[in-house]
């Protein structure tokens, strides 16, 4: 059934409840932004009370009323039915039970009672959702009430002391418990509800502090999660103070906004003005914790809209701006780039499509109350993502309320599908670079003494050793399954694309309780962007403790190519050092053709060969690779088998032991044992045909003019572009820099545009001398001073700029 947007808004409970309620909430925000304060905002007409907000909370879980004949909704109901029926069939309902499910025994283990509450929430949702076999069943309701009482008495009550992972006690269990209580509120005995509110008061009394460490202020996604819990506890207990506490936690009223979610930060957790999002102080986490924060904030804004507890902080606009700055650049046709998902890459039940769907759902929910200028643009973007992603449709991953919001957009004839985002994005504050073109995208995962190379812990991300060493994620054309289709349990973790590694054996990471991060000792990681289109990125690689590996790596990202350079590759450990050009997942039975210098190579698994002077290679469906002809190219086809359990043994995220098999084609450069001052150069041509790759190899439209430990530089003559990464004072391609810097210069007609950054954050002032004459300054950042002339000189105040780009245009 193809419902119009107007019909769907009227008949879908989730959307209807939100759209009506957010009018008053957004009016309050607008009033505060225009000069009033939250206290001055007018009282909404017919203010919404506790019961109405509880109905809204239920609708946010079930989707409310929907058309059961609609194929998308019926598919969503069927998916919920399948999961819930499996849980119902295995739920231990016996009088002498010691656990609710056999695989979650003992129930006293935090991971087990945490997951038990999550499963009970799924059952309660199915019970409250029309169309499932459990819907409205008195037997199911009675069993759920008894199960909640069992979990409380046996494992999770105010008399217990926190053990193991704090998250289960303070976020995971109480959120699921409150959701269950919302759904079952008319069936719960008053004494039971009182007990459940008491346990939340014990372990999550407010969103401002960590309960097991009261001096630790909650930040980022953890603060949002707790604010939602406190709000639901306030609704269920009809406690206005709790609701006010939840609302105020978003703005961190307690600590005068220090940890507000509606502010930009310059260190630690939260949103940065350059679009970065950091959690756990040093981890690039847009796609995991960032998505949780966005979803939680959208939930509370929608839940409380129109009530006396509505969010009226004028700085909520920071959250709106974060959609475009922070999330849109790292969402590719609905999937979330793995470069910003942290240890979540090892979770079998997460995946880039599922985390992407969570971000899409959060954006759509936020749009229900956002100003039209934001909301209309977001809906266009989302419609483009959803219509292009045919690999894993959103409806296969979304809940019923999320499906309702998506259909409102998809069925709206006035909302046009937005095109793919294009541009070059340097997230200097989280050591990530994203380059996007109309048909492909490339993400670089870098690290430094400021941002971790990886996070592991609680049994997650056991093999993430090299994920922050310059791993290059190539999203080519419509291949949306590359990193979602069994990639992480089967890829050779020593051969991640873009990395330079030695071949030492590594031990599993993060096998103990708690999470930990590894930050290397290098300073340089980041780069500069010119005109939002071109980029120069650099990373100094310093091996971990016990390794002497050192190298300097550069990437120059252009309209149709990525040029990768390496210099100064040295090691004295007696180990082979390799640079991985590509390690492409071909799926379970892929036989995509590999050409090397125009000659087709064998397709049988286990085939390998060294090509001494290869000039180019091509993989069907992916693109081309242009080599320098000096270094030997190694190629391998192999079928690799692994398990999700081998990379994630987490209490609530641990993967299965079922074998997963995928085929790969791998290309790499072997630098030999203990190399001294070795190097490499290669070009990625995403989506290029074999013929186009051969032409590029012959014509070399981008010239490499320097590749050593002083500078790495390229010239793209057709674009009038010169790009240099300086590792110290020096001259390359006619450009002179007084110190380490990333510099891009483009000549366009009579104008000369220059971009400069200090990705190592080591300097205070840089001088850059150009070989192109200029008579005057057209525009310049206030950090840039220009002396025009035959060889103009720019003086750039880079100190304190945290690696961000400074720009000037001359003529």
Image (spheres, rainbow, N blue to C red):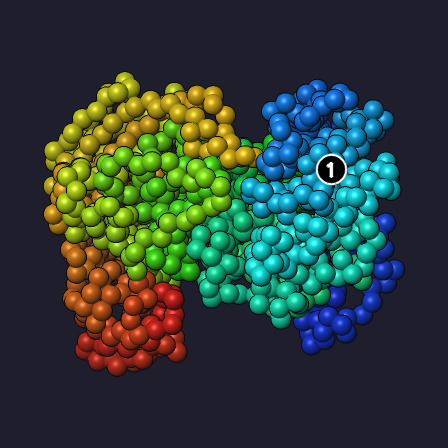
In this rendering, is residue 490 above or below 564? above
Q: Measuring 74% from the left and 66% from the top, which residue is drawn there?
A: 28
762 displayed left or right of 396: left
Residue 617 x/y as whole percent: 23, 34
- The residue wearing badge 1 is 152
Residue 415 x/y as whole percent: 63, 48
Count of number-bearing discs: 1
Does residue 19 appear in the picture of this structure?
Answer: no
Q: Measuring 85% from the left and 26% from the top, which residue is drawn there?
A: 138
391 displayed left or right of 631: right
Q: Measuring 54% from the left and 34% from the top, which residue is drawn there?
A: 651
716 displayed left or right of 343: left
In this rendering, is residue 703 above or below 390? below
Front residue of 85/535: it is 85
Front residue of 63/603: it is 63
Front residue of 691/282: it is 282
Q: Measuring 13% from the left and 50% from the top, which residue is drawn there?
A: 677
Where does the N terminus fall, quadrant-wise?
Answer: top right
For this orientation, the residue located farthest to the top is: 604
Residue 291 x/y as whole percent: 56, 49
* Quarter location, residue 371: bottom right
Residue 62 x/y as whole percent: 74, 38
In this rendering, is residue 120 above or below 696? above
Front residue of 444/125: it is 125
Label 1 neighbourhood size at 10 Å, few (<14), some (14-19), many (20+)?
Answer: some
116 displayed left or right of 244: left
Label 1: which secondary element: helix
Where does the C terminus fall, quadrant-wise?
Answer: bottom left
Does residue 589 appear in the picture of this structure?
Answer: yes
* Quarter location, residue 727: bottom left
């Amino acid at each position: 059934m193809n419902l119009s947007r107007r019909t769907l808004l009227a008949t879908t409970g989730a959307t209807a409840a939100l759209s009506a309620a957010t009018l008053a909430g957004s009016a309050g925000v607008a009033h505060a932004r225009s000069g009033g304060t939250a206290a001055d905002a007018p009282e909404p007409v017919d203010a919404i009370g506790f019961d109405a907000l509880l109905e809204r909370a239920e609708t946010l879980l079930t989707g409310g009323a929907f058309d059961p004949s609609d194929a998308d909704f019926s598919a969503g109901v069927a998916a919920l039915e399948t999961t819930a029926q499996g849980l119902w069939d295995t739920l231990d309902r016996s009088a002498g039970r010691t656990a609710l499910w056999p695989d979650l025994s003992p129930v006293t283990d935090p991971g087990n009672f945490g997951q038990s509450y999550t499963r009970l929430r799924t059952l309660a949702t199915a019970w409250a959702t029309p169309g499932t076999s459990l819907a409205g069943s008195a037997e199911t309701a009675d069993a759920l009430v008894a199960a909640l009482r069992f979990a409380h008495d046996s494992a999770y009550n105010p008399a217990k002391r926190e053990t193991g992972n704090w998250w289960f006690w303070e976020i995971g269990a109480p959120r699921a418990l409150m959701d269950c209580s919302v759904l079952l509120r008319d069936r719960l005995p008053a004494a039971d509800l009182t007990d459940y509110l008491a346990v939340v008061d014990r372990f999550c009394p407010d969103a401002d502090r960590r309960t097991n460490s009261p001096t630790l202020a909650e930040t980022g996604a953890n603060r949002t999660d707790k604010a939602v819990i406190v709000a639901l506890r306030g609704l269920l207990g009809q406690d206005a103070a709790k609701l006010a506490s939840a609302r105020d936690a978003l703005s961190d009223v307690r600590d005068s906004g220090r940890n507000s979610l509606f502010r930009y930060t310059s260190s630690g957790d939260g949103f940065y003005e350059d679009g970065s999002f950091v959690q756990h102080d040093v981890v690039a986490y847009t796609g995991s914790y960032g998505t949780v924060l966005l979803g939680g904030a959208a939930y509370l804004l929608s839940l409380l809209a129109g009530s006396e507890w509505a969010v009226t902080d004028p700085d909520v606009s920071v959250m709106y701006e974060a959609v475009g700055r922070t999330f849109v650049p790292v969402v590719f046709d609905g999937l979330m780039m793995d470069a910003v998902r942290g240890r979540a890459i090892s979770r079998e039940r997460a995946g880039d499509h599922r985390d992407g769907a969570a971000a899409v759902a959060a954006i759509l929910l936020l749009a229900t109350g956002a100003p039209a200028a934001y909301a209309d643009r977001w809906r266009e973007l989302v419609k483009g993502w959803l219509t292009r992603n045919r690999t894993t449709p959103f409806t296969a991953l979304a809940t019923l309320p999320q499906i309702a919001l998506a259909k409102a957009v998809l069925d709206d004839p006035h909302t046009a599908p937005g095109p793919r985002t294009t541009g070059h994005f340097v997230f200097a504050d989280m050591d990530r670079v994203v380059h996007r073109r109309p048909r492909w995208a490339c993400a670089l995962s870098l690290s430094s003494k400021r941002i971790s190379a990886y996070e592991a812990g609680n049994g997650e991300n056991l093999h993430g050793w090299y994920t922050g060493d310059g791993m290059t994620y190539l999203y080519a054309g419509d291949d949306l399954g590359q990193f979602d289709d069994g990639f992480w349990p089967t890829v050779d973790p020593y051969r991640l694309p873009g990395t330079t590694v030695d071949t030492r054996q590594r031990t599993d990471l993060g096998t103990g309780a708690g999470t930990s991060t590894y930050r290397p000792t290098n300073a340089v990681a980041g780069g500069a962007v010119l005109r939002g289109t071109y980029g120069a990125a650099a990373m100094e690689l310093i091996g971990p403790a016990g390794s002497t590996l050192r190298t300097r790596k550069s990437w120059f990202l252009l309209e149709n190519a990525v040029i990768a350079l390496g210099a100064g590759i040295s090691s004295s450990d007696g180990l082979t050092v390799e640079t991985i050009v590509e390690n492409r997942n071909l799926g379970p039975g892929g036989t995509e053709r590999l050409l090397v210098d125009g000659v087709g190579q064998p397709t049988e698994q286990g085939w390998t060969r060294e090509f001494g002077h290869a000039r180019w290679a091509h993989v069907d469906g992916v693109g081309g690779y242009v080599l320098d002809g000096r270094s030997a190219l190694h190629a391998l086809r192999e079928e690799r088998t692994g398990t999700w359990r081998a990379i994630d043994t987490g209490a609530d995220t641990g993967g299965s032991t079922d074998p997963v098999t995928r085929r790969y084609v791998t290309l790499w450069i072997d630098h030999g044992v203990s190399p001294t001052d070795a190097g490499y150069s290669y070009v990625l041509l995403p989506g290029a045909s074999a013929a186009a790759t051969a032409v590029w190899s012959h014509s070399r439209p981008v010239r490499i003019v320097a590749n050593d430990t002083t500078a790495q530089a390229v010239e793209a003559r057709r674009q009038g572009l010169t790009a240099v990464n300086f590792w110290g004072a020096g001259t390359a391609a006619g450009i002179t820099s007084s110190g380490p810097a990333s510099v891009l210069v483009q000549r366009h007609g009579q104008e000369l545009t220059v971009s400069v950054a200090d990705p190592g954050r080591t300097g205070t002032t840089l001088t850059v001398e150009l070989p192109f004459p200029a008579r005057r300054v057209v525009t310049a950042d206030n950090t840039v001073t220009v002396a025009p002339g035959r060889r103009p000189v720019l003086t750039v105040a880079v100190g304190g700029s945290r690696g961000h780009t400074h720009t000037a245009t001359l003529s």
